Each structure stands twice: as C-alpha cells, then as structure tokens.
Image (cartoon, grey):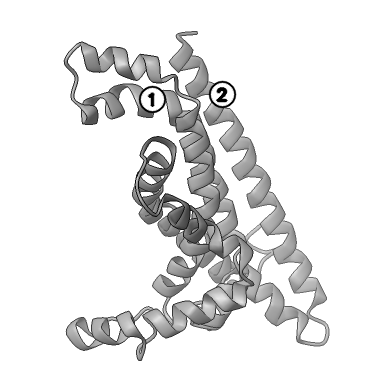
Amino acid sequence: MSDWLTAGEWVALWLSLKVAFWATLCSLPFGLLVGHALARWSFPGKGLLNALVLLPLILPPVVTGYLLLVTFGRNGVVGGWLYQVTGFTFAFQWMGAALAAAVMAFPLMVRAIRLSIEAVDRKIEDAAGTLGASPLRVWWTVTLPLALPGVLAGAVLAFAKAMGEFGATITFVASIPGQTQTVPTAIYEALQVPGGETAALRLVAVSVAVAVVAVLASEWLSLRVARRVRGA
C-alpha cells in the first residue's frame, strides 16, 4: 500500500488519524460529564445546554468554522489572549484541526453517552448508595461499567466523524499540506486540479476503509463489553 499512496497522501492520512485521535481523546472527559449531566441532573438551563451541544449538527460546518476562527484565531476573543500569554495559536495548526473536529464530533459522542447512561437502572445505583458508596464511587463502579458499551460507541462515532470533518476544518485552519491538510481537504484539493480524480479516488477508498474498520471495531468492543457486564 506504500506504493499505492503518494508521500503527500500518506502525510494527509497520518494527520487525519492524529487529528481524530486527539479530538476524541480530549473531548471524551467533557462528553462523559455533559452526557451524565443531561441524563441524570436537573438544573436551570438544561435545555439550553442540550441545544448548545447539538448546535454543531444544525449549523452549516462553515459557520462553525468561522465561529471557531473569531473565537480561537490569533485575533479572536480567546485565541488573542492565549497568543499574547503563551505564544500559542490554534489557527493554521494541526491542533486547530483537532479542535474543529472535536467540536463537530462532540454532539454524536454526547448523545450516545447520554442514552447509555439513561439506560442504566437507577435502582442499581441506589442500591450501591445505600451500601455506603459515595456518588463518585457509584458512578465509577456501577454507572460507568454498565454504560461502557455506549461510551465506546460514542467515542468511535466521534473518531469517525473527526476523520471525515471538512467544512469547519478548512474554514478554521485552511488546507496546508503537511500541517492542516487532512484526507477530506486533500480530496477537495485533488478535485480542483485537472486529472486529480485518481488521487481523490485513492483517498476516498482509504476513507471508506478506515470508516468500516472503525464501525466494526465499535461493534466488536461494544458486544464484548456488554457480555462482560452481563457476566457471560
């Protein structure tokens, strides 16, 4: 396969995998917190939080990318302060691509986690509480293990979404070969060049293969964890 893809295409594939991995890993703790809050807690503004979480699914990706740019860009509200204090900027860096991918994938992750936590029988949690377990211990030893199949499914869905993210990424960090050019943006660039259809087709095939592997891995992991939880 090393002879099938060009060096630039390998770089784009590796960058896509890195972006998707870090986007999923860094957003997972927040996904667990928000998913649990929406599933179990009652608080003012819960409906607003749910709407904000789902907003990236509703807005055009270009709009989300623009909002990221004006917020986290070098002259943005948060990005400008961050650049002045630390010299770090998300714009036109692979970390910015990871941020954009995480924002776009976050709703899918939260929804899967929320549904899995809602499916956990509260009587089991209450029983653990009556035996003296603290709320944190109940969550760690009861809720999380029982919800783990949904958590894994949400993480893999987020990873697959991050791998395919295009609109917000190209708006926020552009498409710089070797720095921010992921597989989707590389496909777009290839289609803008006469005769680039062959390169685009190769990258499309790679994207499909990675997506299929991710879905199969998600199903396998979910089934294995579910059997372990049931004691099979």
First of labels 1, 2 by sequence position: 1
Pick the residue in front: 39 or 28. 39
- Residue placed at 74% from the left, 73% from the top? 199
Left or right: where 135 falls relative to 28? left
Mark 2 lies on residue:
223
To which quarter of the image does residue 206 belong? bottom right
Q: Which amino acid does label 1 sit on?
A: Pro
Q: Is residue 106 left or right of residue 143?
A: right
Q: Where is residue 143 in the image (x, y as percent from the top left)?
A: 36, 26
Question: Which residue carries the number 1 mark?
Answer: 145
Q: Which residue is drawn at 72% across and 79% down?
A: 190
Quarter of the figure with residue 96: bottom left
Query: Does 50 sit above or below residue 203?
Result: above
Q: Which of marks 1 and 2 is in front?
A: 1
Q: On screen, 43 above or below 207?
A: above
| Residue 32 image label | none
Amino acid type of the residue tagged 2 in the rendering: Leu
Image coordinates for residue 220, horizontal then vertical, percent: 58, 29
